């Protein structure tokens, strides 16, 4: 076995010498920090906008079917985001170890870790799909869906569970690309897939061009097909262009070790990411007490919010590789500079968003429903919560930075504070006496508190990582 592993490593060293120039790795340990952040973030913004357009386009066309269908999408979103967030933890673990391997210029490790992350993704997505399919009715009943909504939820979620590998695996594959400094390729792929989804949605939902009218089921099918295209494109690029995937016995022999290093970051990062949608599931349960239209209103505003937060999502996806590569190179000053730059970006863009969304709130909410109650409550959400977007944006980047340096536990604590410990007890009691906008206001305040905590904590963590200076040698006279 050892002989085969040595043969594999010799083969890869030859590949590195002969074809290494083809691999589009970017060195983030030199050059301007703001330039790296902008170069990587801007294409990712476009790509994530395209990626998030799946849900928004689904919501737009499904909203034409009726308010029950709109509410069903609200429940579906709260659960699917929980599962996706768990797998974003796997992508965080993959990005963390790959960024550090890239910072060391160790292509053998990059191949082993990328391929092992793919195997892990296959196993995890299969398990989540099986569990999801047998818990549809009890889970959605638990969070407040009524008998009229449950069949609509099932129509969508069954297709989503069956095709979940097409959702989850590309998230991990794109994290591998980002760890090596490339965000442009995934952007192009996501744009093409979003266009495909826009075309397929009305065809399957309304039965255009002779296709059967599938309604909410059609939205799920269109998304599954588009995301399937993303799956094959992402892994094709990783295999042929990055040379970062290798299906061989040598990789399988090293799978356990590679999986352990990925999961050391991935498990707590998954907990961090799952806390947010898990808190949202509980929140949806509380909001259900205000009625199904309150759930629909919150879902409309949250989908609009997802597009507004795309810059922060992109920045958090970029800061992890920047931190990881510079940590491997022992360049701590660059890590601190990157975090301060990210904070300035977040606060400035958050202020712009808050003002812009407040001015457009009525128009935006009116695009998804004609119901006056739904519009009114969605507008209240869009007035109150965007005030905290700058702080929330930095929480995302701080959590990604903790993952990048291989210390994900503080991110778990901050996210728990932001989504569970601070808001849920207050919201629960407030819901007994106050209307829905008070719930939104509490959420906004908790984002601001968490943003302040995360800044001081991540800066202290980076400073603690610096090696202690050696005492000067004293010469006796």
Image (cartoon, grey):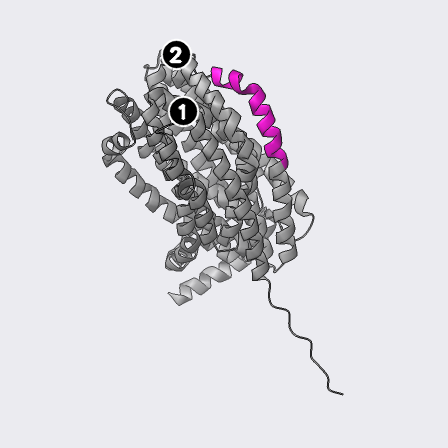
- For marks 1 and 2, the one nearer the N-term is 2
The location of residue 412, given as percent across then percent down, is 43, 49
Tag 1 secondary structure: loop
Residue 406 point in image, percent of width and height: 49, 56
The quarter holding residue 184 reads top right
Query: Residue pushed farthest bottom?
Result: 477
Say which quadrant the N terminus sits in. Answer: bottom left
Q: Is residue 468 magenta?
A: no
* Residue that lies at the very extreme toward the right in this rendered image: 477
Residue 122 at x, y percent in the picture? 35, 44
Which residue does the image show at 41% across and 22% down from the upper left? 297
Give SS at disc 2. Answer: helix
Q: In the picture shown, does residue 357 fall above or below 85?
A: above
Q: Which residue was labeled with disc 2?
A: 209
Query: Residue 353, relative to residue 325: is it above or below?
Result: above
User: In the picture, residue 331 is in which quadrant?
Assistant: bottom right
Decide if residue 53 is in sight here.
yes
From the viewer's perspective, is the residue at label 1 or at label 2 nearer? 1
Residue picked out by circle 1: 435
Q: Residues within 10 Å of mark 1 (few under 14, many from 20)?
A: few
Q: Quadrant of the C terminus?
A: bottom right
């Amino acid at each position: 076995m050892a002989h085969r592993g040595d043969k594999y490593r010799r083969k890869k060293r030859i590949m590195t010498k002969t074809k290494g120039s083809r691999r589009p790795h970017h060195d983030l340990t030199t050059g301007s920090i703001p330039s790296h952040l902008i170069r990587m973030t801007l294409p990712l913004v476009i790509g994530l906008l395209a990626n998030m357009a799946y849900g928004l386009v689904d919501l737009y066309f499904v909203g034409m079917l009726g308010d029950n269908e709109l509410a069903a999408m609200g429940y579906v979103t709260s659960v699917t985001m929980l599962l996706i967030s768990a797998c974003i933890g796997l992508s965080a673990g993959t990005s963390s170890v790959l960024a550090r391997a890239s910072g060391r210029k160790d292509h053998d490790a990059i191949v082993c870790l990328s391929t092992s992350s793919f195997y892990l993704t296959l196993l995890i997505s299969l398990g989540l799909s099986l569990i999801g399919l047998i818990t549809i009715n009890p889970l959605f009943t638990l969070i407040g869906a009524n008998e009229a909504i449950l069949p609509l939820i099932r129509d969508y979620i069954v297709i989503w569970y069956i095709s979940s590998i097409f959702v989850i695996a590309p998230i991990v594959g794109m994290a591998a690309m980002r760890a090596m400094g490339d965000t442009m390729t995934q952007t192009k792929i996501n744009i093409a897939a979003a266009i495909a989804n826009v075309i397929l949605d009305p065809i399957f939902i309304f039965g255009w061009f002779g296709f059967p009218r599938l309604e909410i089921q059609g939205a799920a099918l269109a998304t599954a097909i588009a995301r399937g295209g993303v799956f094959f494109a992402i892994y094709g690029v990783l295999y042929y262009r990055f040379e970062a995937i290798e299906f061989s016995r040598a990789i399988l022999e090293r799978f356990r070790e590679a999986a352990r290093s990925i999961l050391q970051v991935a498990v707590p990062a998954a907990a961090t990411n799952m806390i947010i949608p898990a808190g949202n599931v509980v929140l949806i349960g509380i909001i259900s007490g205000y009625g199904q239209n309150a759930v629909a209103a919150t879902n409309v505003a949250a989908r609009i919010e997802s597009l507004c937060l795309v810059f922060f999502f992109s920045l958090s996806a970029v800061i992890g590789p920047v931190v990881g590569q510079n940590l491997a190179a022992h360049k701590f000053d660059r890590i601190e500079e990157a975090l301060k730059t990210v904070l300035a970006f977040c606060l400035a863009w958050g202020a712009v968003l808050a003002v812009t969304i407040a001015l457009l709130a009525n128009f935006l909410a009116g695009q998804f429903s004609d119901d006056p109650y739904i519009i009114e409550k969605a507008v209240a959400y869009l007035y109150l919560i965007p005030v905290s977007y700058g702080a929330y944006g930095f929480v995302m980047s701080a959590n990604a930075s903790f993952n990048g340096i291989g210390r994900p536990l503080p991110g778990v604590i901050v996210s728990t504070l932001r989504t569970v410990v601070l808001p849920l007890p207050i919201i629960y009691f407030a819901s007994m006496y106050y209307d829905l906008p008070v719930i939104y206001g509490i959420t906004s305040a908790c984002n601001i508190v968490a943003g302040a905590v995360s800044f001081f904590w991540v800066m202290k963590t980076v400073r603690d990582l610096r090696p202690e200076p050696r005492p000067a040698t004293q010469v006796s006279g």
